[in-house]
Image (spheres, helix red, strand yellow):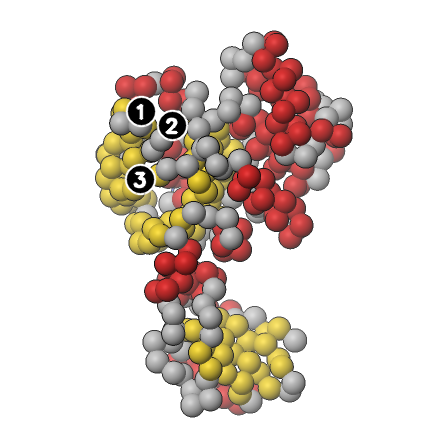
Amino acid sequence: MNLILDKISKCFGDKIVLDDISLELTPGVYGILGANGSGKTTLMRILATVMNPSSGHISFNGQDINDMEHRYRELIGYLPQQVGLYKSFTAEKFLSYIAYLKGLTKAETQDKVTEVLDLVGLSEQRKEKVGKYSGGMKRRIGIAQALLNDPKLLIVDEPTAGLDPKERIRLRNLLSRISSHRIVLLSTHIVSDIEYIAKEVLILKEGQLIQKDTPQRLLNEIEGKVWTVQVSEGEILELQSKYKVVNIALVREKYELRILSDTRPHIHAISEVPHLEDLYLYHFDEGASQDAAVKV
Ligand SMILES: Nc1ncnc2c1ncn2[C@@H]1O[C@H](COP(=O)(O)OP(=O)(O)OP(=O)(O)O)[C@@H](O)[C@H]1O
């Protein structure tokens, strides 16, 4: 199974929002990373057929999705950033209603609703009104509705925004679990959401796909470029003016700076194992030095 994007571009007026994106997706989780406005949502909306590209083609298993029409739509599950939930409906009723809209029969609906509620861990809360659900539960019911038609392509746009760490971990494990026989495309700003579950990471910058690779291979790219050094407060400003300082932590009355640099930034700097967050900041460094948080 594969989904191929061939030179996809999208313009709004004279603004190019997606610029010549070509890639192939196969089953597994793909994490799309990018700063605000880099085109993540636009790409997902195009794949979900909510929006047409300005140019380029998309094919699923060799067939142009425009020729497949509703057959392609039946293969998709889509969770947009904002999902409209019927707040006074119970989870069960909400999912049954969506199943009806997706064309499932009554008999199929009952089994499928039970199955997806179980999958997202909401079986016990099936009789509760979704309006009373926590943020994390709302996201999980959103994923459950997207799974009702057993999609081969699941598109989830920033599903972890606003969730606490426990719910984020729960959600990412859920997405990982269901990805063995489907393509899962997940957009986020939060690197740790995808660091452990993504088969490949796609980095979008100003509408261009600047990276697409396994997390490990991407990390190899910045091997030897991540450093830490302990300095006094007086040295911080100078290092910040010369290098990308991505973190500042107070450690035993010294300041430990995490620095991205091609060369050793300080005589006492120690080379560190890179994390995906370092790679992200390497590409989206605007303001990193100024924003580096002081952790005490
Ligand atoms: N319907 C539209 N008309 C005009 N411009 C648009 C439209 N939709 C998106 N844009 C612009 O396209 C660019 C990319 O937006 P998009 O929402 O795809 O980015 P994003 O990476 O998802 O951002 P975020 O992380 O903030 O959700 C932005 O500059 C946005 O203002």
- In depth, the one of 281 and 180 nearer the eye is 180
Give coordinates of residue 204: x percent, y percent. Answer: 36, 50
Q: Give the residue at mark 3.
A: 24
Q: Give the residue at mark 1.
A: 65
Contact between labelled residues 1 and 2, with CB atoms less than 8 Å apart: yes
User: Quadrant where the C terminus lies?
Assistant: bottom right
Q: Which is more N-terminal, label 1 or label 2?
A: 2
Q: CA distance from mark 2 to mark 3?
A: 17 Å
Residue 162 shows in the view: no
Relative to residue 192, is residue 288 depicted above or below?
below
Q: Which is more N-terminal, label 3 or label 2?
A: 3
Residue type at mark 3 is Glu
10 Å crowding of disc 3: few (<14), some (14-19), many (20+): few
Closer to the eye: label 1 or 3: 3
Residue type at mark 1 is Ile
Helix or strand or loop: what does disc 3 sit on? strand
